[in-house]
Image (cartoon, helix red, strand yellow):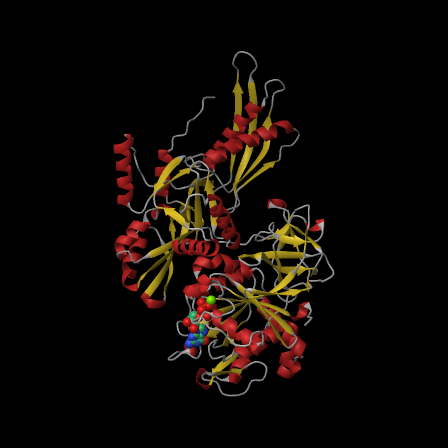
Amino acid sequence: MPYVTDAIRNIALAGQASAGKTTLFEALLHAGGAIQTAGSIERGTTVSDHDPLEKERKHSLGTAIASIDVGDAHINLVDTPGSPDFRGPTLSALAAVETCAIVVDAATGIAHQTRRLMDRARQRNLCRILVVNKIDHDGIDLEGVVEALRDEFGSECLPINLPAKGGSAVVDCFFQPSGEADFSSVADAHQHIIDQVVEINESVMGHYLDDGESGLSGQELHDAFEQCLREGHLVPICFTSGRTGAGVKELLTLAAKLLPNPKEGNPPQFVKGNGANAEAIDAVPDPKKHVIADVFKIVNDPFVGKLSVFRVYQGTVKKDTQLFIDDAKKPFKVGHLFKLRGKDHVEIEQAIPGDIAAVAKIEEIHFDAVLHDSHDEDQIHLKPLDFPMPMFGLAVEPAHKGQEQKLATALAKLGEEDPCFRIEHNKELNESVIRGLSDLHLKLMLERMKERYGVEVKTRCFRIEHNKELNESVIRGLSDLHLKLMLERMKERYGVEVKTRPPKIAYRETIAAKAEGHHRHKKQTGGAGQFGEVFLRVEPLPRGSGFEFRDEVKGGTIPGQFIPAVEKGVRQVLEHGAVAGYQLQDVRVIVYDGKYHAVDSKEIAFITAGKKAFLDAIAKAKPQVLEPIVNLDVFVPDAHMGDVTGGLASKRARISGTDSLRGGEIIIKAQVPLAEVTDYQTELKAMTGGQGRYAIEFSHYEPVPAQVQKQLTEAYKPRVEED
Ligand SMILES: Nc1nc2c(ncn2[C@@H]2O[C@H](COP(=O)(O)OP(=O)(O)O)[C@@H](O)[C@H]2O)c(=O)[nH]1
Ligand SMILES: [Mg+2]
């Protein structure tokens, strides 16, 4: 059925694992007539969890997409995995939708993942709705869940329907409010939503105050509702049971009538160019303009090959036309164009702005590639999405000799599908290291590789890393004892003894104040001399901005040809640090004056002068040593909660929350300096008898405590060169 952009709704179902997203996805497809019978998780028959590993584990590990036509609306629904190990695919999918429906398990309430996703969706400016699911469950307190949601996420969270008949149905509170609810009152719920909606702009408020609800036209109310969703002024709460189907039709109606179409949501930002020169570009959902589409998912299907799934933001992608990938000179031909339904696809002729579609077997396409049909759109890409950095590593080699190439290919294919799964090849040691978000993440990726590509690996428990930046060798093993025995063996066999210490931490340096620096470099050794003089200013930049160099020299007091030399000197300090020997960051250097000598000024003289002027400025600019802070998630049986939080308290950790998971497990979330948890494995094992696990992800840099700064700067004795 042909449809226009206004008819499209792109909705992602997100939320904690086991909230019932996949079952709800199935129920929505069924209610919308897209499938004949609803499958189930237990029987492994859902559209979404079609991967053998998903069926076996009864958990979604990747996103699935399918469409439903309801009345005039065309709903593209994306099911996402709730497990934090697979948040790479989940976060990628959020880039392709206007609405994020956060599914909450009515039986267990708000989970850590609920909070995380509410935050992410808000940061991305997505319209949000909360879906309280499993309302058929015995012994649940739905009124309590609503209160908890409003306490936690704000009074803008308001029920748009309410459970009725003991959770076997729902009653509408927005369109035609009437009937009895299990708690609260339909009339009150209606009033609260209307009050919230009319607040959003003065003209609507005016009409409402004059004539009440009848003073508002349907269109006016609809537009005000959209504005509320867009601005986060309203987060509707609705109720469903994916299992019994209660509230499912109502959710489809809500999507069709009230959720934003691609013109009404907040589009993600595109930029043209890179770094400081990047220019913001607005993609316009006009079918006649040039094509701009973004690839947000890659699947290497064993039968169809590589499938690249994209969201069209502008223009119309047509079958048999040509598209460019990023800045590539040569286009590819869109031989076949598909809409997806789980693992199946349906061929289509065109994909209009706002729609989600796929092309098959185009090897050059990668995750986050921009597809376009004119060189005017070269260098355009989505503003980078924020993905967690994979911190867990494992060295792998093929279990069977001769499978090296097969392993490399299989790993590369898996890497394409998950932005948080990376493969590094260490040339020096000739080994592949895979990195992911947790040991479970790595384990599942390796299982998938075995299942899909028939490649098995040995993971090595003892390995060697060389860190170039810190110039140190690090050995990793399973325990203290393991490493100790390996080193004893080395001594006994090869007669080499080593001194050991925990791995170094990649500290950084920065400054906390503005300051001026000056250096005059003058040297007379026999023949030609060296002369260069530099005046500069330094200023702190926000964390994470890196380095900026500005030339504000007036009247040629330092001739243009020597400015690069000054910058070179400054960059030497950046690389090697000024006070503790670590890279310097988040600083702006402005060179504004100097002196030169017609004969004696040489490049080398300005390199030295630049370097020393910079060191002079830093010394006066409150230099600071920064340390990496990581997000730490610790999973332990709840009996160990006290020990773990106590242990973290002594590690300068900030505990941000705890949550109960299923089966008596809890998760403790904290931010902690990396330096404090280099050996956390051993400690956690001792504390929990091997029942705990944890995941670490890099968060940001922060100044170290004064005491630590003192130790680090004293330990560093810069080799001060002779003038
Ligand atoms: N009682 C009840 N159980 C449900 C409902 N939806 C899902 N479940 C069960 O909850 C478990 C997790 O469901 P699933 O759809 O995989 O959740 P997901 O991880 O959010 O995708 C499965 O055992 C489902 O059968 C529901 O509406 N009511
Ligand atoms: Mg699922």
Residue lying at 55% horizontally and 19% vertically, measured from the top left: 530
Depth check: give the residue in front, 61 or 215: 61
Residue 345 seen from this side: yes
Q: Hey, which residue is sitting farthest right in the picture? A: 288
Rendered view: 322 above or below 599:
below
Rendered view: 153 above or below 590:
below
Position of residue 72 in the picture relative to residue 620 (left or right): right
Q: Quadrant of residue 252?
A: bottom right
Depth check: give the residue in front, 681 or 215: 681
Depth check: give the residue in front, 7 or 232: 7
At which x and y percent is residue 513? 48, 41
At which x and y percent is residue 47? 52, 69
Position of residue 339 in the picture relative to residue 670 (left or right): right
Position of residue 100 in the picture relative to residue 659 (left or right): right
Residue 282 seen from this side: no
Q: Hey, which residue is sitting farthest top in the picture? A: 526
At which x and y percent is residue 32? 58, 76
Residue lying at 29% horizontally and 46% vertically, measured from the top left: 479
Rendered view: 95 above or below 422:
below
Q: How many marks?
A: 0
The N terminus appears in which quarter of the rendering?
bottom right
Position of residue 125 in the picture relative to residue 579 (left or right): right
Depth check: give the residue in front, 620 or 5: 5
At which x and y percent is residue 414? 50, 53
Q: Quadrant of residue 269?
A: bottom right
Q: Hey, which residue is sitting farthest bottom in the picture? A: 179
